[in-house]
Image: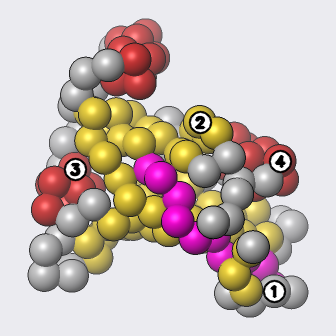
Amino acid sequence: MSAITAEMKAMIEKEQCFVVTADRSGQPSAAPKGSLVVLDDTTLAYGEGIGGLTYRNLRENPRVAVVVADRAARKAYRFFGVGELRTEGSLFDTFATKFAQMGLDLKAAVEIRITEIYDLSVAKAGAKVN
């Protein structure tokens, strides 16, 4: 299993991340997620506030991709994983507090267990990270 490196974590903290989901039939959807964070070397998480298409897709199909890119550095990563909607517990409470501070409601916290990571940088063009 691939692990999230310090470089990847710094990029996730600084750059816009996009979460890619698909419904049961395979219809894809990509959405920016400003709350995405690294929980540990193999887990990402974000707060789902809208409860729209991404939320509905995860209820039907837990497979997720997360893409983060630094255009200036010409570096990017794609993380594949399995997302789990959490509507209670400490992860949910953490995101609920953050969202409340911004005047937003939280539908669920999404915990993503990473299964594969790919380097999408110009120099490495889709190489799997070991």
Residue 38 in the image, given as x and y percentages of width and height: 62, 40
Query: What residue did someone put label 4 on?
Result: 6
Query: What residue did someone put label 1 on?
Result: 124
State which tag comes first along the sequence, 1 or 4: 4
Q: Residue furthest front?
A: 1
Residue 87 in the image, given as x and y percentages of width and height: 22, 28
Q: Secondary structure at mark 3?
A: helix
Is 57 on the left-hand or right-hand side of 1? Answer: left
Query: What residue did someone put label 2 on?
Result: 39
State which tag comes first along the sequence, 3 or 1: 3
Query: What residue did someone put label 3 on?
Result: 55
The Cα–Cα distance between marks 1 and 4, rounded to whole angstroms, is 18 Å
Name the residue nearer the viewer: 34 or 43: 43
Q: What's the magenta region?
A: 112-122
Residue drawn at x 27%, y 41% is 85
Residue 89 in the image, given as x and y percentages of width and height: 32, 19
- Residue 115 in the magenta stretch? The answer is yes
Q: Residue 85, relative to residue 83: is it above or below?
A: above
Residue drawn at x 75%, y 62% is 70
Q: Tell me, yes or no, whether the two marked residues, 2 and 4, touch with CB atoms within 8 Å.
A: no
